[in-house]
Amino acid sequence: MMGRDDRPNILVVEDSPAVRLSVAGYLEGRGFEVTEAENGRAAINALDGHSFDLIVTDVLMPEVDGIELIKAARSAQPGVKILAMSGGAPNMPAGYVLKMTRMFNADDIIYKPFLNEELGAAVARLLDEPHAN
């Protein structure tokens, strides 16, 4: 299910525009085909029209959170890989959120704030691609 030119197709889901642009820009710079969604609802709509190789999603988002999105994605596109991003919330430690995410079937997790190299390594692992910084 590769994107145009056989490039992996990645859906980036993040309600913070700065983080979303940073992640999408980094991945585009690495040669991936990237679709952006500002929340889980927009992401679920995107799943309708496109098939993705990887979803990189925030966990805590308004309206439809990452856990609901992961469930919907697993049912719509069972083969898709999922990378969850979280920095936790004031009343919930990141570790707890990410344990929950594992329970709901994410393939890997990354803690915010993260370096581009960490993101690149996680994406390379999930897509079985050679990792270059």
Image (tube, helix red, strand yellow):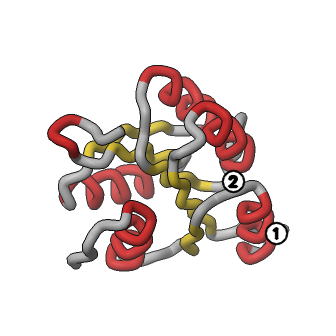
Q: Do the residues labelled 2 and 1 touch (CB within 8 Å)?
A: yes
Q: In this view, does 70 lie to the left or right of 113?
A: right
Say which residue appears at 61% left-offset and 31% top-offset.
76
Q: Which of 42 and 31 is in front in this view?
A: 31
Residue 92: image tag: 1
Q: What element carries label 2?
A: loop
Disc 1 residue type (three-letter): Met
Label whose residue precedes the other's in the sequence (2 or 1): 2
Q: Is residue 14 left or right of residue 133?
A: right
Residue 76 in the image: above or below residue 10: above
Mark 2 sits on what residue? 60
Disc 2 residue type (three-letter): Leu
Q: Which of 75 and 32 is in front in this view?
A: 75
Q: How far apart are marks 2 and 1 (CA)?
A: 10 Å
Say which residue appears at 53% left-offset and 60% top-offset.
83
Percent position (x, y) of residue 90?
77, 69
Q: What element carries label 1?
A: loop
Q: How crowded is mark 1: few (under 14 residues within 10 Å), some or many (20 or more)?
A: few
Q: Residues within 10 Å of mark 2 (few under 14, many from 20)?
A: many
